[in-house]
Amino acid sequence: MTESMDTEQAEPTSGSAFLEERIRTLLQQMTLEEKIGQMAQVPSGGGHLPHHLREAIQRGQVGSVINEVDVATVNELQRTAVEESRLGIPLLVGRDVIHGFATVFPIPLGQAASWNPRLVELGARIAAHEAASRGVNWTFAPMIDISRDPRWGRIAESLGEDPFLTGSLGSAMVRGFQGEDLSAPGSIAACAKHFAGYGASESGKDYNTTNIPEGELRNVYLPPFQAAVDAGVASIMTSFSDLNGVPATANTLILQQILRDEWGFDGLVVSDWDSIHQLAVHGFTAGDRDSAFEAATAGVDMEMASQTYAHHLASLVHDGRMTIEHIDTMVSNILRTKFRLGLFDTPYTDPSMLPDIAAPEHLAAARHAAVESLVLLKNDVRVLPLSAESLASVAVIGPLADDPQEQLGTWIFDGDARHSVTALQAIRDMVGDRVTVHHARGVDTTRSHDRSGFDDAVRAAEQSDVVVMFLGEEAILSGEAHCRADIALPGNQEALIDALAATGKPLVLVLMTGRPLALERVVPKVHAVVCAWHPGSLGGPAIADVLFGVESPSGKLPVTFPRVTGQIPIYYSHKHGGKPGTPETFVHIDDIQARAPQLSVGNTSFHFDVHYSPLYPFGHGLSYTTFEYDSVRVDPPELAVSGTITVSAEVTNTGDRDGTEVAQLYVRDLVGNVTRPVKELKGFQRVFLAAYERRTVSFTLTPEDLSFFGRANTRIVEPGRFHVWIGGSSDTQTRAEFDLTD
Ligand code: NOJ
């Protein structure tokens, strides 16, 4: 056998070596201008291909188009790139497909309340199929920013406050969008965003600065991104925000050292919209030329919308400030993503290969997702479930009871409200002629200050056996740049509740909202509260199923509900502090004696005017049955650094109804090299239990699960004592303990 034959046989025809070879071959043929062209993501014409865009594509000046969902136009865009540009490189076609496409699933925060990765994965899969049938091959999701500030409107788009839950569900979304084979029809590239720390925007005001110590960044904000990278996410988007004085879009620590060097990410990093140009607005650079330099050298491969790369990178190379090797690395990341998507082999979209948009099975999945996203927060006198057999009449009140658009929530560019079924419609369908439904809006919008609708609402309540109120926030009050300084119910809704409470009828509050609301004043006035978030296309039937007991609620809060806005930030995984608030030391402002001496009250950590606990803790959620936990135990009794430990508990359905419980595993590291949170979620399982069934739930923990970034910002495993809990909420008290030994 000759040497050359040997070489020929060894040459790969698939796999990563082959892919890298194809990238190298292509790079060798590209001019500097064509390379920089690949880095440009430009807005589409929206349903047509404008002349200037066609020419730019022909000249090889466009790598990606954003916001085109007309499939004929997308195919024409691709044809222009493939057949009319010199090297025929296909385009990435990006779109914000955040919680569904035409079929809208609950907002991500609502999906997170399901604590069900399989459901979240299916939602993303369906969204990918629908988007792909329009030619979209890249979505800007999942958004996996940890947020502990519900004033921030983008919390709606997040998966909540917890790194472990967000990491699990964010990875599920990545798997759903990308499928097992990114190049298969119906798979689209996911984009984990916003890297990093965006959820910590000061005062919950969007685009605001963030200050996050590196340890906290690594322990809290980055783990979901690492989970997404481990799940194979194709791309990452940088954040608009300033992170510790270095805007995320030019932050070498996160973009180079952590993402590339420590995690080995080899996909594509895209800026956010104009965020490279904004580096100068931040006062970080003197203008676009420096902005292009800072972002490119930090590791941003593609520029969304602004044109600083197009205008300045070539001259930065000619002037010797940037090397061609660096440019090649950036382009390789873009080409790698295009190859992985199979775009060079199949650039065109044939919608007939994919299921219809809003197919019945898509809508059924959206309904199921909405059912699992509902969280029963309160049901004191068991007013729920309602019985269509024993009720004669029900009042359905509120501006969100019958609004097909508002129930879809934020980020629904392609959502089609014609597929929506509202709660009023669904309740009418469910009860038929058996129960009279009296409907009144009460207030025109959630923000209205007008009381002219109150009388109708009160009349409807007086004529009914039970009152169900659909209140909260319209979709416009949450999402990007839609932040609030006070997260109580807006407008006159509290006054409406007062007016309805005066009727003495049982009151059920169904909250439709994009964020936790501060409801301390409201909750005592109502008998039951269901948090429905913005539940999506089939939110109405899902709500009716839960209200009337066809389904038992199983959702759990992915984020803490504060009592009042002033408690923010309030989250379960806080630090203990040296003087924590206690029941013995807490004093309410109304109970302080006149002329009390300074040291007679206070002295521990609380506000005078509100209890230090939240209204509803992370993980909280009731069912129509009840669950109890006992016998938390560990086996073996100690965890060796090279070993594993099993934590188990018995969970019993103590009611006479079947139900699903989310069993949650929490740990506390009692002494740390840096102070450790009072509880950290380390596992969860959805468990179906028949009435009165008792079952063992078990979780495995490894030392790696207990590791954290310590004082030197490196990952450490520290021997010592741990508390461990298994329960149905973060306020669980059922615990055991063990030692991690050398
Ligand atoms: C700005 C948003 O911050 C980001 O999340 C989104 O994906 C892009 N715009 C594209 O629309």
Image: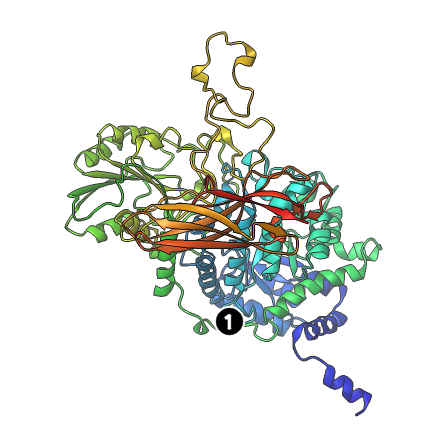
Q: Position of residue 718 (x, y in %)?
A: 67, 45
Residue at point 44%, 31% (across, down): 563
Q: Can residue 48 be seen?
A: no
Residue at point 27%, 53% (across, down): 550
Q: Can residue 626 be seen?
A: yes
Q: Position of residue 101 (x, y in %)?
A: 44, 58
Q: Quadrant of residue 440?
A: top left
Specify whether 10 is left or right of 468. Answer: right
Residue topped by disc 1: 185
Q: Position of residue 475 (x, y in %)?
A: 42, 44
540 lies above or below 527 = below
Residue lying at the far top of the rendered structure? 595
Specify whether 460 is left or right of 423. Answer: left
In the image, 269 versus 633, the foreground residue is 633
In the image, 426 versus 666, the foreground residue is 666
Disc 1 packing (10 Å; few <14; some 14–19; many ≥20): many
Q: Secondary structure at mark 1?
A: loop
Specify whether 469 is left or right of 190. Answer: left
Quadrant where the N terminus sits is bottom right
Q: Position of residue 336 (x, y in %)?
A: 66, 67
Residue lying at the far front of the rendered structure? 637
Q: Three-letter amino acid code at disc 1?
A: Pro
Residue at point 61%, 48% (across, down): 706
Residue lying at the far bottom of the rendered structure? 1
In the image, 628 versus 466, the foreground residue is 628
